[in-house]
Image (tube, rainbow, N blue to C red):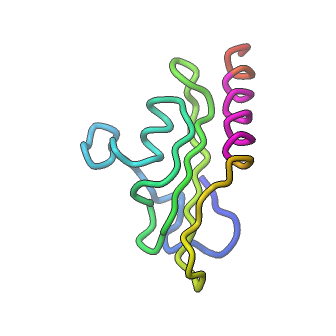
Amino acid sequence: QMSFGKKPPRDPKTIELNMNSPRVAQMPVARAFLDGFLQEGGAPLFDNGEFSLAVPIGAGTNSYGVIYADKIRGLAKEPFSLSDHMRASLNSVVQLFDLALSKI
């Protein structure tokens, strides 16, 4: 667990999620891990997050984790969203992770 960019409001190493909690089960990070699909939007992990993205690393029995990002609320007036190009690129990365991990 680590972070890049500006220092997050919480140390990522201290984040623990109970996957049996109904609230947590609906979070993008949990959905990505459990379902194995790219998740965008939904409840962010950080209080000042306005957009979240969760990229699964593996799927099913090959689930290893999630690359997670929160867009922290800033001065921009327009809400952030992924372009179709960014979404397609990330879905390709998800498929590559799954393919690579299925060979282990």
- Total marks shown come to 0
Question: Which residue does the image show at 68% across and 54% down from the upper left?
Answer: 83
Question: Which residue does the image show at 70% across and 29% down from the upper left?
Answer: 97
Question: Which residue does the image show at 54% across and 33% down from the upper left?
Answer: 37
Q: Is residue 1 magenta?
A: no
Residue lying furthest left: 22
57 displayed left or right of 46: right
In the image, residue 12 sits, relative to residue 10, either above or below, namely: above
Residue 87: percent from the left, percent from the top? Answer: 67, 45
In the image, residue 70 sits, relative to residue 89, either above or below, namely: below
Say which of 91 and 99 sits in front: 91
Residue lying furthest top: 103
Question: Which residue does the image show at 49% across and 35% down from the upper left?
Answer: 33
Residue 20: percent from the left, percent from the top? Answer: 28, 37
In the image, residue 56 sits, relative to residue 47, either above or below, namely: above
In the image, residue 101 sits, relative to residue 70, either above or below, namely: above
12 displayed left or right of 93: left
Quarter holding residue 31: top left
25 displayed left or right of 63: left
Residue 53: percent from the left, percent from the top? Answer: 56, 52
Residue 103: percent from the left, percent from the top? Answer: 73, 13
Quarter holding residue 47: bottom left
Q: Would you say the magenta stretch is mainly helix, strand or loop?
A: helix
Q: Is residue 92 magenta?
A: yes
Q: The C terminus is located in which quarter?
A: top right
Range shown magenta? 87-98
